Amino acid sequence: MLLKGEFNIKSSAEDLWDFMLLPENLVDCVPGCEEIQMIDEKTYSGIVAAKVSFISVRFKGQAKLENINRPKHLTISGRGEDITRLGSCKGSVIIDLNENSEGNVTVFYKANVNVVGKLATMGDRIMRAKAKEAEKEFTQALSDKISGREVIKPELKTKISDLITVIFGSLIEKLRNIWKSVFKIVLGEGPHDQ
């Protein structure tokens, strides 16, 4: 799944760069993050919980900083596995910081993420919606933390709207498959020709 976007933070690029690479800052800003430890100056390990609809996972994994061009460009590659073995994920994120004259930094990101297991059954549309929600939570927390305001991390909870979306998504997919089968039979392409 390819995700990309941008957001603005009131800061200098240097300050934001330093701020984002400290584990104690990231743990407060990343939605669902329970723990981050710095293994060395380019490697981090951590545990992040995620909940999409009625499925909850806790990924334990590592991330490595690559292609570093301080304070403008960075690639992060990582992988994680659910502690209860419900799935795994791997991917990379390209981050570019662009400082403007108004004292803001625009953060551009492009992530390529591959999720396998229970979360992958949610489908692309639901996963994208959840990623967008996580981006908003991260941006707000990062903005609050860098400006010295208290960070309030949202709880991981199942929303009724998520559950309805999953049920409708599954139902629509099943109906689509039934209609495809019916059309194949009507057009003479079905199993009765064999």
Image (spheres, rainbow, N blue to C red):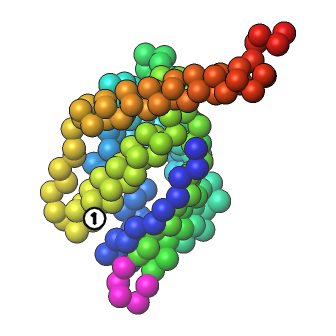
**Is residue 2 rendered to the left or right of residue 59?**
right
The span shown in magenta is 100-104
Give above or below for 111 relative to 127: below
User: Which residue occupies 15% across, 57% down?
Assistant: 150
Give above or below for 9 relative to 85: below
Type of amino acid at the residue the image marks with label 1: Ser
From the image, tell me which residue sits under label 1: 143
Please tell me which residue lies in front, 14 or 184: 184
Please tell me which residue lies in front, 112 or 127: 127
User: Which residue occupies 36% across, 48% down?
Assistant: 134
User: Which residue occupies 76% across, 12% down?
Assistant: 191
* Residue 140 location, quadrant: bottom left
Residue 57 magenta: no
Residue 62 is situated, as x and y percent measured from the top left of the image, at: 52, 37
Please tell me which residue lies in front, 172 or 18: 172
The reply to whether residue 68 is visible in this rendering is yes
Please tell me which residue lies in front, 173 or 32: 173
**Is residue 135 rendered to the left or right of residue 111?**
left
For label 1, count other residues whose C-alpha is less than 10 Å away and answer few (under 14), some (14-19) or many (20+): some
* Residue 181 location, quadrant: top right
> Which quarter of the image is occupied by the C terminus?
top right
Give above or below for 113 relative to 96: above
The reply to whether residue 65 is visible in this rendering is no
Residue 158 is situated, as x and y percent measured from the top left of the image, at: 26, 31
Residue 24 is situated, as x and y percent measured from the top left of the image, at: 31, 49
**Is residue 187 rendered to the left or right of residue 108?**
right
Query: Farthest residue toward the left?
Result: 150
Q: Secondary structure at mark 1?
A: helix
User: Which residue occupies 55% across, 30% down?
Assistant: 176
Q: Main secondary structure of the magenta part?
A: loop
Query: Farthest residue toward the right?
Result: 194
**Is residue 70 rendered to the left or right of residue 30?**
right
